[in-house]
Image (spheres, rainbow, N blue to C red):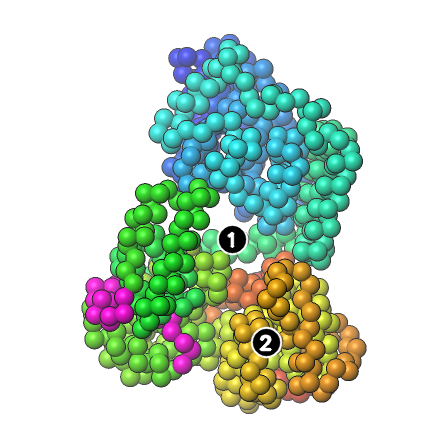
Amino acid sequence: MRSLTLTKRGDGVAVLLFDTPKRPVNVLSGEMLEEAGPLMEEIQEDDAIVACVLASAKADSFIAGADLDQVVGMTAAQAEAISRGAHEWLDRVEGSRKPFVAAIHGAALGGGLEVALACHYRIATDHPKTILALPEVMLGVLPAAGGTQRLVRLIGLQRALPMLLTGKRVRAAQAFRHGLVDALTSSGGLVETAAKAALGLAKGTLKASRDKQPLSERPLSLPPVRAYALGKARDEVMKKTRGLYPAPLEILACVEKGLADGMEAGQEEEAVRFGKLVGSEGSKNLIRLFEAMTALKKTPKGDEPGTVRRLGVLGAGLMGEGIAAVSLSLGSVVLKDVSEEGLSRAAKGLRRGLDRRVRSGGLTRLERDRQWYGLRPTTRPEDLAGCDLVIEAVFEDLALKRKVLAEVETVLAPGAVFASNTSALPIAQIAAKAKHPERVVGMHYFSPVPKMPLLEVVVAEKTAPWAVATARAFGVAQGKTVIVVKDGPGFYTTRILGPFINEAVVLLDEGAAIPALDAALLDFGFPVGPVALLDEVGIDVAAHVSKDLGKAFAARGAAPSGTFAKLFDAGYRGRKNGKGFYLYPKDKPSGGTKEVNPEVYAFFGGAGRKSMPAVDLVDRLALLMVNEAVWCLSEGIIDSPRDGDAGAILGLGFPPFRGGPFRHVDAVGAAEIVERMEELAERHGKRFLPAPRLVEMARAGKTFYGS
């Protein structure tokens, strides 16, 4: 089956239709490049063709990017060759005497946007599903089909760099304002509208936006402006990535080369640097993470999930409001709380969120109103009758969670599911007195719910498979990457985080400096240092989790630091009450460098701090997390290394370019990990003893993912 089909219309316009076989979206591949060559010849040589429209046969996608299955398996040389082949094809499109028009509806991502950029005219639908972006940087690579060159020339450095360096997505209206697309239209009759534009270009009655201002008159043509903008961008990249993610710097090098020495030189730079990145382990890990996320959003074979038309959310705090926010598009939402004031605050927050999406173009006014009128705030338990799924998001207290479960069970239908949003309390304990424990499941969301991509579905011994399937499917519908984990203290993510944060406090007890400890883990690749994370999570929450997990794993030497209790008793809660390891002055913005709260050192033996090797700080925290992940796999808490890696990265910020705890073991080698942990165990206690499975792998020379 072919990916490209050429149809010739009677008015002289040819339509080149993208339709990748057996895929829900179009992807660029080596096979597609081979098909494109002969079709380009036909378009150029057939005198009956005066112009060409590029369009998609898929319902809601133009082209979603490159075939990542092919990219992850490429060598550097193969990646370079693919890049040069894409350059050759799109240079022919751009240099054609016959105009090419891109008809864009849905996602034009990565190579898809690069195809559109090579066209002489771009027309896009104003539908919320139409999004344009170059997200390659998030996969550890760079746009390799001319994107680093054409985007800057079309919309300028100021607008192009955020798209190139962060993968920023642009909706159709904004793309039109910036000159990224030339015209907007409705989704109906897109190809017909594009064909009229193509004929206008061919006849000279229509002019493309790129031709309206000569390149010499654009700001990027001034070398001092270019140098300043690129220098500032490079400084910002280093500040955010600490040099751990090479793709942004490689992108800047391609942009700089092209602006200084011309398009051809820039494309050659693009091909070479693309090959270099594709061949790196960091890039392959980022692509593997994307593939894992995609796989985890597919419905597995087995029990059919129930349909959730009406959702109940218990608790109108930040978590409850967040759960409601990601659910309004899926059906009606009953938001219950004991406080009218809490309901009012949450409702205002939800309305602001909907209005924000309308302003960004992500939601129509009609859809906003439909979602808004589907929200029912209430203080009455009986209003939950008819809900297919109820998610409680009340305070992390076992007695309270049992109470709300008992209250809700009296009104729920037999086929309804009850889910607890808990980060650590075992689901079996919550459901211990339930009338129907088979329909009780855990749905552990991460804060802030609308932004955090992970959902941990927790299965207790008595939870029915159909309840798990319903919770999982609903989480996927909310846009979450879902891992299904076994019940137990801390489940998976909280369990592997517990030793990490506890060891951070132990190190402070031993004299480590707060800035040095955070900097060491930032340099390893975590997005937030462990001490700053304690402030964000809440010292009260961390103390509670550390205490519970310490009891559960005391036999392995996982005793919690006594300083947690002292901080808690002294009123330290972290950012939430402005009293934590760092200062949070109300008159200063949240950004910038945080200052350590000097008073907190009194709990750790005074302000005098010791200098400790960064490698020791990193290993004592990161290897405890890795080791606990291996324990979880051995005990069946998680089903696979893939799930464990995705959960640690998406839920806890384990460095994505390292691939997660299990990929990290494979990269370093189980034998080296075991040797280092045994050394730490001799110096600091048996909590560092490697998991038996790690020891076995070290002896046998095995890896988690095989060859």
The residue tagged 1 is: 291
Foreground residue among 368 and 417: 368
Q: What residue type is labelled 2?
A: Lys
User: Residue drawn at (39%, 12%), measured in percent from left and top?
Assistant: 10
Residue 657: image location, x then y, percent: 63, 58
Above or below residue 474? Residue 336 is: below
Q: Which residue lies furthest to the front in this view?
A: 587
Quadrant in the picture for residue 683: bottom right
Q: Can you tell which of label 1 and label 2 is closer to the viewer? A: 2
Q: Does the magenta stretch include residue 390?
A: yes
Q: Give the range drawn in magenta.
A: 378-397
Say which residue appears at 48% left-offset and 15% top-offset.
Answer: 200
Horizontal side, residue 373 vs residue 157: left or right? left
> Residue 704 falls in which quadrant of the image?
bottom right
Please say if 349 is above or below 86: below
Q: Which amino acid does label 1 sit on?
A: Glu
Residue that label 2 marks: 579
The quadrant of the picture occupied by the C terminus is bottom right
Residue 690 visible within the image: no
Residue 96 disc label? none
Q: Residue at x 51, y 27 (%)?
A: 182
Screen quadrant of the N terminus: top left
Q: Residue 35 at what x, y percent from top left?
A: 52, 28
* Figure quadrant of residue 364: top left
Instruction: List x then y, in percent, for residue 560.
Output: 58, 86
Which residue is found at the position 54% from the left and 41% from the top? 133
Q: State whether residue 452 appears in this view.
A: yes
Mark 2 lies on a secondary structure that is: loop
Q: Does the magenta-highlighted stretch encompass residue 672?
A: no
Asked which secondary structure carries label 1, the reply is helix
